[in-house]
Image (cartoon, rainbow, N blue to C red):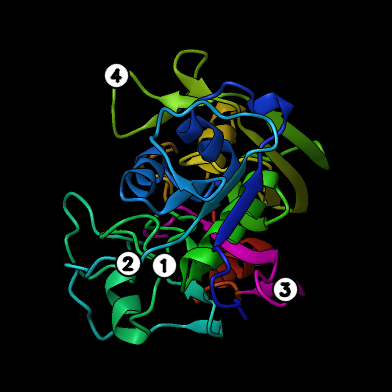
Amino acid sequence: MKEENMPDFEYVANALDLRERLDKVLVKAMPGFSRNRIQQLIDFGYVLVNDEEVKRNTKVRENDIITAEYPEAESLEVVAEKMDLDVLYEDSDLLVINKPKGLVVHPGAGNPSHTLVNGLLYHCQDLSGINGITRPGIVHRIDKDTSGCLVVAKNDKSHHELSHQLQERTLKRTYWALIHGVLEHNSGRIEAPIGRDKSDRQKMTVTAINSKPAVTHFKVLERFKNMTLVECQLETGRTHQIRVHFQYIGFPLVGDLKYGLHQTLDTDGQCLHALAIDFIHPTSEQAMHFEAPLPTYFTTLIQKLRSGDAV
């Protein structure tokens, strides 16, 4: 439990931070916060350097003690909606949800309501405010047509700690995917930078232009006549990463209308499931592991492939 007058965040500047702007130092030290959010905290006096209020462009010195308080999250304008959520785990700091296929994670253009965030606000109401009004509690996302494990933060401290684990790659996400083609390698590593597709802004692509490094590890679980079931571990978390990487190596996901083949086998979206998630609990510091069972459409298709009923 936090002691009275104890800051929510404390950081001692080192030699690498010397003469850097305060907001730039905190972007690295507080990975769960955007630069805009950090600048707001500084501007409103929630960040102190050696117990004094400072400006966002203050130059940091070695051994400066930087502390921050997390203000109460602003009132949310997103409407809470009653929703049948599949909660795998919940405590005062976080939830782990088994998100169904077809559910958008947070409100956005074209999806102002009926999202996971709307359901979460009805379910628990106390969510972290780091990501702003439309994305409360959302530490990481999975696509609308991807099902499975998603961890949600209930307060800013938990959000910061989980985001830090995500950045340091100690928060591990395991996916199962069904891909077109028979993959000969039993395991492998796909390393290819991902950025926005210049010809279609709604798509991502492997490119060296305005891209970020992306790494996906995979191993083959089962081979069928024309398809392969693979398990994937994300080393990075780029938008549509697994879908883009397997398209790039010539094995697009089954049912993926955006990156795959026209042949969909009536899957109503890509065959991609976030099977498991592992992280260290932000308060108890215990190792946590959760699994979400494969949805019925996925297990049914695998059974058909085993029996030879599916093409």
Disc 2 packing (10 Å; few <14; some 14–19; many ≥20): some
Disc sitting over residue 195 in the figure: none
Q: Which residue position holds label 4?
A: 199
Please state which of the two labelled residues, at mark 4 or mark 3, is closer to the viewer.
3
Tell me whether circle 1 and circle 2 mark residues in contact (CB < 8 Å).
yes
* Element marked by disc 4: loop
Disc 3 packing (10 Å; few <14; some 14–19; many ≥20): few
Q: What's the amino acid at mark 3?
A: Met
Is residue 177 visible to us here? no
Magenta stretch? 265-291
Q: Residue at x 22, y 81 (%)?
A: 81
Q: Residue at x 51, y 34 (%)?
A: 244
**Distance of mark 1 from mark 2, alpha carbons?**
7 Å
Q: Which residue position holds label 2?
A: 73
**Distance of mark 2 from mark 4, alpha carbons?**
38 Å
User: Which quadrant of the structure image shows residue 265?
Assistant: bottom left
Q: Is residue 216 above or below residue 83?
A: above
Left or right of residue 222, residue 202 in this image: left
**Distance of mark 3 from mark 2, alpha carbons?**
27 Å
